[in-house]
Image (tube, helix red, strand yellow):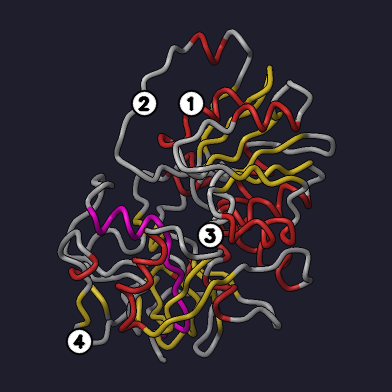
Amino acid sequence: MVRTPGAATTALQLETLPDPSPGPGQLVLEVEACGVCFHDVVTRNGTLKAGIVPPFIPGHEICGTVVALGRDTGGVVVGQRVATTQRAHVCGTCRHCTGGREPLCAEAVFLGDAGLNGGYAEYVTLDAGMVVPVPDGVGPDAAAIAACAIGTMFHAVREVGRVAPGDTVLVTGAGGGLGMHGVQLARLAGGRVLAQTTSLSKVGALHAAGAHDVVLHARGEDFSGAVKDLTGGDGVDVVIDNVGTPLFQPTRRSVAKAGRWVLVGQLTGDFVPFNPAQIFLRGVSLLSATSTTRAELRQVLALLARGAIRAVLDRALPLSAAAEAHGLVEAGRALGRVTLRPAA
């Protein structure tokens, strides 16, 4: 397994631990693939502090094979191939769990944030209810990122942003692991998709993913003028915002009256000042999307299985290359998701 006790990529250390055993209601997965999310970067470098307890094994996007079961684990069997939600545990009975908002459960345990139980390892332990069977034809890397990179976008586009045919949708950070899938899902929902990026090398891939227009600009440049030009001066109906503070002001200027701005990602620890009147006087709804439910994960895997969307994967690396993977993601050089293959 790879664990991290500190901020630099050199803090990712390959170590050997005893194999885990499942408790009641739990299973053990042999990890086939684990996605590398920017969440892993901000937990490692200290930007995200809430709920983080180092040293820890990162990784919350996992596909693997069930190799051991505790008692009271109906519905799964040893040898079954499954994908995880981003959590090791939810209570299952609170108003959030029973209302289809299980990521907000007060007892939720996010995989890889605390303790030595994340996906950058050969084995991981979690509640049996936190996994979904992987359909035939969906590979391990695609299944691994189904809940986070794809499922979070599915939740943001469909449930929160309510993208409908005819809507114009701006996806920020469109060339990243979230953004490439946000472009596909917004297009699938019938939206006209504008993809924001600072990477010239990603323009072709964004068009191939379904972007009608790509808003290419230099880092730090206000791109809202280009968005207004593409929308006849109106701005966009929906923003799927995967970047946060670094693009806050140009994004705000890009939203149309009565637009829906869905906050998904925050790449830095910086705050941003703004006048709330700039939001409410234009009827803009400031919304947020967090994580994926089990029901949404099943739907995403079904979409992958029938080819309605595709997992965008930059490369798969061995577990020993976790620091390299973090470097690629942190620098924005990855096109889509990077995965780790512990068995490689």
From this view, report whether residue 297 is shown above or below residue 69.
Answer: above
In 3D space, how far apart are the residues under numbered discs 2 and 1 (Cα atoms)?
A: 9 Å
From this view, report whether residue 69 is shown above or below residue 329.
Answer: below
In 3D space, how far apart are the residues under numbered discs 4 and 3 (Cα atoms)?
A: 29 Å
Q: Quadrant of the N terminus?
A: bottom left
Q: Quadrant of the C terminus?
A: bottom left
Residue 125 as seen in the image, left or right of residue 13: right
Instruction: Say which quarter of the image contains residue 320.
Output: bottom left
For label 4, the SS is loop
How packed is label 1: few (under 14 Cα within 10 Å), some, or many (20 or more)? some
For label 3, the SS is loop
Identity of the residue drawn at 84% across and 35% down: 166
Q: Which residue is mark 4?
A: 16
Q: Are marks 4 and 2 in contact (CB under 8 Å)?
A: no
Name the mark nearer the viewer: 4 or 1. 1
Q: Which mark is residue 177?
A: 3
Q: Point out the tag, 4 or 3, that comes first from the N-terminus.
A: 4
Q: Which residue is mark 2?
A: 272
Residue stretch in magenta: 30-45
Residue 231: percent from left, percent from top:
76, 29
Q: Quick check: can you spot residue 299?
A: no
Q: Point out the tag, 2 or 1, that comes first from the N-terminus.
A: 1
Q: Point out the tag, 2 or 3, that comes first from the N-terminus.
A: 3
Identity of the residue drawn at 33% across and 80% down: 321
Q: Point out the tag, 4 or 1, that comes first from the N-terminus.
A: 4
Identity of the residue drawn at 56% across and 12% down: 280
